[in-house]
Structure formats: structure tokens, C-alpha cells
Image (spheres, grey):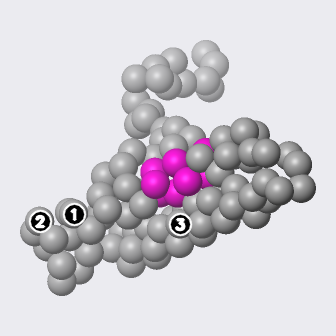
Amino acid sequence: MSNWPTNLLAEDPPKPGLIPAAKPTKIPGLDGPVGTLMGYGLYLIVLAGVAGVGYGIYKLVMSDKSRHGGGSEPFKWIGSGVAAILLSGSLIAILNGIAG
């Protein structure tokens, strides 16, 4: 007889992947549609930040490389996108820590 479990896969709960499911947790004292919209709104801000970073990278690649090109504009897009990602990601983590 071995000590290894034979039906290990059937009993283990599924493990979360790299990106968690975008299901907001209920905030204490803020139930109903307002809490749900606020939870999904934070995930939409993350997606908007990713889009801002992507657009900034696109503008950096396609920008005029001469002396008269707008050199700092792509970095404004990238910086604001990163700021949106960090801000909403930290709010999601705080709210999940409080509500979870």
C-alpha cells in the first residue's frame, strides 16, 4: 500500500489562475447596484489604464523622431495609464481586504 492519494484531482478545489475573476466583493454598508457598479468600475479603470499605456507605446513608436516632434506626449499617456492601473489596483486590493 502506498501513502499517495489516488483521487487527488477529483477532490482538490480549482486553484486561481494568474488573473483573478473580475467579480467584485460586497462592500460593508454599500449593497445593491451601487456597490456592484463601483466594483466593476474599478476593473474598468484598470482596463482604461492598460489602454492608456498601450496608446502611449503606440504614440512613442509612431512619433516624429526629429527635433520638432512632441517628445513628452507618449510618456504622459504611459504615465497616466500606469497611475490609473496602480490606483485602481490598490483600491481593489484594499476593498477585497476589507470586504473579504
Q: Secondary structure at mark 1?
A: helix
Q: Which residue is mark 3?
A: 84
At horizontal 51% and vertical 18% (from top left) the residue drawn is 6
Looking at the image, residue 34 sits to the left or right of residue 9; the answer is left
> What residue is rendered at 18% in x and 83% in y?
29
Q: Residue furthest left?
A: 32
Q: Are marks 2 and 1 in contact (CB under 8 Å)?
A: yes
Q: Are marks 3 and 1 in contact (CB under 8 Å)?
A: no
> Looking at the image, which is closer to me, 39 or 29?
39
Q: Position of residue 14 (x, y in %)?
A: 43, 35
* Residue span colored magenta: 46-54
* Visible residue check, residue 71: yes
Q: Give how far apart the Cα atoms at labels 3 and 1 are.
A: 18 Å
Badge nearest the viewer, 2 or 3: 3
Residue 86 x, y percent position in the rendering: 58, 67
Vertical relation: 5 (above or below) 45: above
Going from the N terminus, do you reach mark 3 or mark 1 first?
Answer: 1
Q: Percent from the top left, x then y, of residue 90? A: 53, 71
User: Quadrant of residue 95 in the image?
Assistant: bottom left
